[in-house]
Image: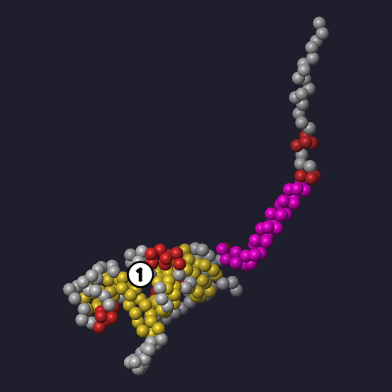
Amino acid sequence: MKEQKNPGAGKGRKPSSKATQPTTANWKKILVVGVGVLFVVLMVVSSMGMSWLNAFTTVQNGTVVTADLTIRDDLGRPIITSDKAIYTAAAKENKTVLLTDQLTVPAGGVYDNQSMQSLPVTAPSAANFTVFGNEYQTMVNGLIGMHVNQMKSVPFDQNASEEQNVTLSSMQFEQLGMNFTNATINEQVILSRAEGLDDTTDMNATPTGYSLRTTTIVDKGADNLTLSFAYKGVDLTVSSIATT
């Protein structure tokens, strides 16, 4: 009886080791793709100039910084902001909010704490906004140590003396144009101060502009209101850092 050959014999051979090795052509393809990707990366980086390095830069004392700001009152309500999204959202809810430009200052610059500083108001109408000297100093000091796109909330040093009592019989109350009966606690009131006038200026002279300051009613008596000028603090977001 003849031995039958297994029909499957020889079909289970292992593939040649040479078949698993990348060919020279494959290596060339991989190299070409890698060079192409590197070229694209270099093009993107070169189009950014040196600005991409700002992401790794820490704001130092004296560095010129451009930053968005939002000053808030004790209840967290935005008073003045350079963020158009915050301004639009608050305006839609009929909240008292002003729009300003971004802040560009030397971080840590020294200012007179007793003097008032101004921020330009661009909406709802052109004017200036009064910032107390200590508030302004707190803002520029708060920028030190920040990075681009970093947001930080910096508290103001509030002072109880930043309050003013306004009586019904005073001229100032009439200038506010308020309805005393309807006035409520936590209601916001914008005060306006004429600029360019002093004790030596003619009474009929025209002011060079007006500086605004949002206050809050914190107390109400039988014939008077107590207005607070104090704010909680400012939200800062670094937009760019000047390179030297």
Does the magenta run of residues contain 230? no
| Residue situated furthest right in the rendering | 2
Asked which secondary structure carries label 1, the reply is loop
Res 179 → quadrant: bottom left
Indicate the position of residue 71 as horizontal and vertical percent values.
40, 69
Q: What stretch is highlighted in magenta?
A: 27-55
Q: Which of 124 and 117 is in front in this view?
A: 124
Toward which corner of the image does residue 218 lie, by quadrant? Answer: bottom left
Question: Which residue occupies the extreme top position in the image?
Answer: 1
- Locate the N terminus by quadrant: top right
Give residue 213's position: percent from left, percent from top.
35, 76
Residue 160 appears in the picture as rendered: no
- Give the residue number, with chain letter if any, for mark 1: 96
Q: Decide: few, some or many residues near mark 1? Use Cα within 10 Å; few <14, some 14-19, many ≥20.
A: some
Position of 128 with respect to 23 (left or right) is left
Q: Position of residue 136 (x, y in %)?
A: 42, 75
- 237 on left or right of 228: right
Left or right of residue 146, residue 196 in this image: left
Left or right side of 85 for 95: left
Q: Could you say where residue 214 lies in the image, as x and y percent from the top left?
A: 34, 73
Does residue 131 show up? yes
Residue under the point 72% across and 54% down: 35
Task: Label the magenta part by its dominant secondary structure.
Answer: helix
Question: Which amino acid, by three-letter code, is at mark 1?
Answer: Thr
Which image quadrant for residue 6?
A: top right
Between 237 and 89, the one lying in front of the other is 89
Check if residue 29 falls in the magenta segment: yes
Q: Which residue is drawn at 21% across and 78% down?
A: 168
